[in-house]
Amino acid sequence: MAGSWGCPHEVDDRCTRVNNLPCNPGMKGCELAGRYRFADDSKNERYWEKRAREEQVAARDRSPGGT
């Protein structure tokens, strides 16, 4: 499988990490959720929330007297 990725939690198209639900990369509980961006933007909510928090911290650190 050169160049592809296989989830170690997927067995027979089921996610053993999330109650044996059908595998849906990016669903809540998936280890990929919030870490990567997906083509289906509905799966990117956690990613964007994480980015917004990181930007708030960076802006606070850049501000004069930011603590």
Image (cartoon, rainbow, N blue to C red):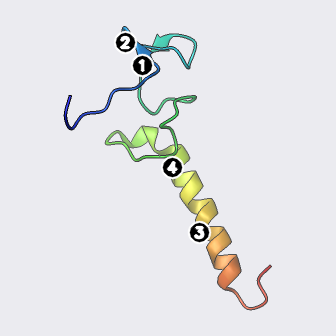
Rendered position, 66 above or below 42: below
The residue that label 1 is drawn on is 23
Tag 2–tag 1 contact (CB < 8 Å): yes
Camera-side mark, 4 or 2:
2
Which disc, if any, is residue 13?
Answer: 2
Q: Amino acid at mark 1?
A: Cys
Q: CA distance from mark 4 to mark 2?
A: 24 Å
Q: Residue drawn at (54%, 59%), measured in percent from left and top?
A: 51
Q: Earlier in the sequence, mark 1 or mark 4?
A: 1
Q: Secondary structure at mark 2?
A: loop
Local packing at callout 4 (Cα closer than 10 Å; few below 14, some 14-19, many 20+) is: some
Tag 4 residue: 47
Pointer 3 residue: 55
Dot 4 amino acid type: Tyr
* Left or right: 63 in relation to 42: right
Residues at badges 3 and 4 in contact (C-beta under 8 Å)?
Answer: no
